[in-house]
Image: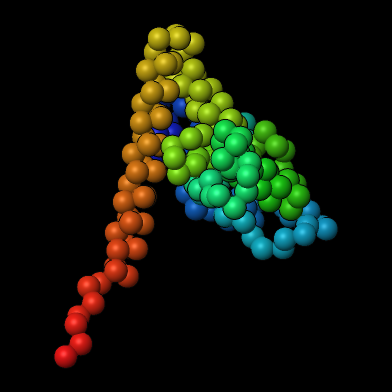
Amino acid sequence: MGHVFQKLHRSGYCDYTVNFETFLSVLGIPQKPNAPDKSDAKADFYLHNPATNRVIITDVMVTHPGFDKKENHTVPLHAASEGVKLKYKRYLENYEIDKADVIPLVFDSYRGYAEASFKFLAKMANTIGANDPQLAASVLRSLRDRVAVALYSGQVELINWLNTFNKPRHAMH
């Protein structure tokens, strides 16, 4: 997703620069004095507007709606929604940062989106589409395709890794 912003910035469609894997202390975002978690969080990627000096941090998470909680199989996208709550809690309880400057991008392994994540993608598509509904819909489909491919690729990598544990057993002689 950050790479999309990089391309938009280079093309002049976005005022924000993009940087990856950066600790919040490096960004100058102070921890709260009574922060429950004193570890330095790392933004998966952050957007910086040089004109306004605004920094928006993103944290990406992929959840799997397991059967350990009834809500995961009775409430649509429950696991993804819980992921958003966890991300907001991590940053808002521990850092001096406005909620509007934290974007949790949470997806579930069945290719669902948390509502906050989908709204961000839709807002981004509308901005890129210059408020043209047809163009914005096309951009949103493209963004969703990128997320789907990323999720699928990640699942393939995980399955391949798990298969390394299923080596054939040799008969004992």
Query: Is 25 in front, or is 102?
Result: 102
Instruction: List the single residue furthest toward the bottom.
Output: 173
Query: Residue 140: where, in percent of width, then height?
Result: 42, 23
The colour scheme of the drawn protein is rainbow
Query: Residue 14: where, in percent of width, then height?
Result: 46, 27
Instruction: List the single residue furthest toward the right.
Output: 34
The residue at 34%/43% (across/down) is: 152
The residue at 82%/57% (across/down) is: 33
Q: Is residue 42 left or right of residue 100?
A: left
Identify the image quadrant of residue 171. Answer: bottom left
Query: Residue 56: where, in percent of width, then height?
Result: 60, 38
The residue at 43%/34% (across/down) is: 5
Instruction: List the single residue furthest toward the left.
Output: 173
Residue 47 vs 140, above or below: the answer is below
Q: Is residue 40 left or right of residue 162?
A: right
**Residue 23 is at least partly visible in this image:** yes
Identify the image quadrant of residue 139. Answer: top left
Residue 126 vs 90, above or below: the answer is above
Query: Is 11 in front, or is 40?
Result: 40
Q: How many circles with numbers are drawn on the protein?
A: 0
Query: Is 136 in front, or is 63?
Result: 63
The residue at 67%/43% (across/down) is: 85
Which quadrant holds the C terminus?
bottom left
**Residue 50 is at least partly visible in this image:** no
Which quadrant holds the N terminus?
top left
Query: Is 120 in front, or is 42?
Result: 120
